[in-house]
Image (cartoon, rainbow, N blue to C red):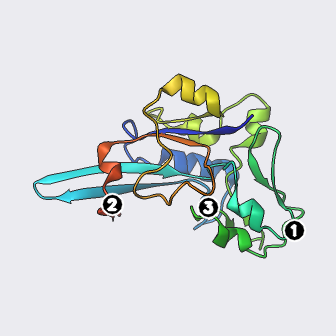
Amino acid sequence: MSVGFYFDMTRCTGCRACQVACKDKNRLDVGTVFRYAKTFSVGSFPSVSGYSYSASCNHCGAPACMAACPTGAIYRADDGTVIIDQEVCTGEASCTTACPYGIPQILPSGKAGKCDGCYAIREAGGQPACVAGCPNRALDFGDFDELKAKYGADLVSEVAVLPSADTTAPSLLIKAKDAANDTNYVEVNW
């Protein structure tokens, strides 16, 4: 079994409710985020388009962070969730440079941290905080094959703002806007 995220870019407004819900649930310090949302613009006047992208750990099938961890602190749970064991982590930071998505980060505690898909909440029958907090229902989480069946065949794992998925096999399904394939994007800061 493998779990992952579904992201519907056509429903996302870039409101960052997912980011706030994750930050609140994990009680993260200022400057630390396990899920972030960014907005991008493509084209030039008068033909401008835009989209938002919400990102966190992709719980990859071949996680580069796990392969790079010298202590074995990063492991896959039985359902495929990629987790960092805080008791084993030494904060060596090789996971932070190995992940092509830039997701693991060193926390103020000196240890690495990242999204664990709200593993404890899911074990108790709930949804990840980001999924539950999205007002437009642009996010879902679950068994990867079930997500594919539920949301259809027009899904991708790569868009222009992401690195190639060739080496890590991310457990990520995106219903992308056409604009998300344009490599001449500009991040919009607001």
- Label 2, label 1: how far apart the Cα atoms are: 37 Å
Name the image quarter holding residue 147.
top right
Secondary structure found at label 2? loop
| Disc with the residue nearer the chain's start (3 vs 1) | 1
Q: Can you say which quadrant of the picture contains the C terminus? A: bottom left
Residue type, mark 2 in image: Thr
Q: Which mark is residue 183?
A: 2
Please tell me how crowded label 2 is: few (under 14), some (14-19), or many (20+) other residues with Cα within 10 Å: few
Residue type, mark 1 in image: Thr
Please tell me how crowded label 3 is: few (under 14), some (14-19), or many (20+) other residues with Cα within 10 Å: many
Whether tag 2 and tag 1 are in contact, CB under 8 A, the answer is no
Q: Can you say which quadrant of the picture contains the N terminus? A: top right
Residue at left offset 89%, top offset 64%: 88
Residue 21 versus residue 165: which sits nearer the camera? 165
Residue type, mark 3 in image: Ile
Q: Residue 103 carries which label?
A: 3
Residue 174 position in % (x across, y down): 47, 41
Residue 59 position in % (x across, y down): 67, 48
Left or right: 158, with 40 as reference point: right
- Label 2, label 3: how far apart the Cα atoms are: 21 Å
Left or right: 36, with 72 as reference point: left
Asked whether residue 171 appears in the rendered view, the answer is yes
Q: Residue 39 carries which label?
A: none
Image position of 65 with respect to 125: above or below = below
Asked whether residue 107 appears in the rendered view, the answer is no
Residue identifier under label 1: 71
Residue at left offset 63%, top offset 55%: 168
Image position of 117 with respect to 168: above or below = above
Left or right: 138, with 141 as reference point: left
Residue at left offset 66%, top offset 33%: 127
Please tell me how crowded label 1 is: few (under 14), some (14-19), or many (20+) other residues with Cα within 10 Å: few
Question: Which of labels 2 and 3 is toward the front?
Answer: 2
